[in-house]
Amino acid sequence: MKRSLVVVVLSLACGSSSSLGPIPPVDVSKPSFANSSITAEHLRTYVELLASDDYGGRGTLEEGEAKAAAYLASQFDSFGLVPLPGQGSYRVGAELERTGFEVERTHGTIIVGDTKKVITGGVHFKPFGFSASGEVKAEAVFAGYGISRPDLGYDDYEGLDVSGKIVFVLRHAPKKDKSDKRFERGRDSFFVTKAEVARKKG
């Protein structure tokens, strides 16, 4: 697990891209000035710029994120905004953890009868950030969606013995039909919830 220093922008503001030229002066004493200063054209320009390939998706701790933060800070400065009290910059450092795994040490073998299949981390599967390091050898069992909610009339683990076994589950949640909203936007569909349920069951 690696620790990295990331710089984030503390304030948010809308402003003009350098390609749009200087912003005309406005009377900021009148709240209505904001209505005319923010247009669809301006907003589209910012979105297209920050979503462009030059910013590489702006992923956390990635080069594109730092570039986007620098762009926003330059815009703040051009608008005449001042940093928060006690801050000498629009940005402040914060320590984040970057999780990952060693590809050459992350692999497995699935055996079905006389057939063996070697699986490689990053190719056939990817460990989650909450995964621990270690080795395991056990039988595998399929547990549907991996959801156990008897109170909602649904339990993938009913009658299933998963004790000491590796549990495979499907993503998302089941639906009888379009009107079935039992698990809609619920924690039961989260990866970490399914992992916790599997651990408790076996």
Image (cartoon, rainbow, N blue to C red):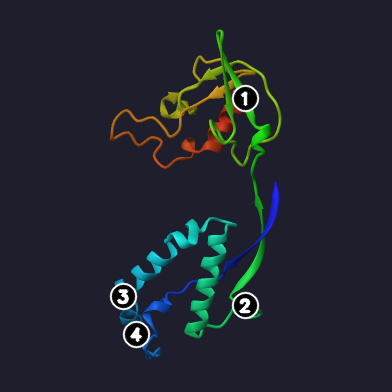
Q: Earlier in the sequence, mark 2 or mark 1?
A: 2
Contact, mark 2 vs mark 3 (Cβ under 8 Å): no
Q: Earlier in the sequence, mark 1 or mark 3?
A: 3
Instruction: Indicate left or right for 50 with 44 as reference.
Output: right
Query: Mark 3 falls on what kind of element?
Result: loop
Report the mark closest to the observer, 2 or 1: 1
Counting residues from the start of the chain, the first of labels 2 and 3 encountered is 3
Camera-nearest label, 1 or 4: 1
> Does 23 appear above or below 110?
below
Of the residues tagged 1 and 3, which is closer to the observer? 1
Residue type (three-letter) at the residue carrying disc 1: Gly
Tell me if residue 120 can be seen. Answer: yes
Residue indicated by mark 1? 108
Q: Which residue matches tag 4? A: 33
- Residue 194: % across, % down: 53, 32
Q: Amino acid at mark 2?
A: Ser
**SS at mark 1 in the image:** strand
Q: Position of residue 48 (x, y in %)?
A: 38, 65
Instruction: Give the CA separation, mark 4 to mark 2.
Output: 27 Å
C-beta proximity under 8 Å, tags 4 and 2: no
Q: Identify the residue position indicated by label 2 in the image.
A: 89
Viewer-nearest residue: 63 or 93: 63
Front residue of 110/178: it is 110
Give whichever of discs 1 and 4 has the lower sequence position: 4
Q: Nearer the viewer, mark 4 or mark 2?
A: 2
The residue where tag 3 is placed is 39
Amino acid identity at mark 3:
Thr
How dense is the environment of label 1, judged by Cα within 10 Å: few (below 14), some, or many (20 and up)?
some
Is any atom of residue 16 visible in this view?
no
Ranked by sequence position, the earlier of labels 4 and 2 is 4
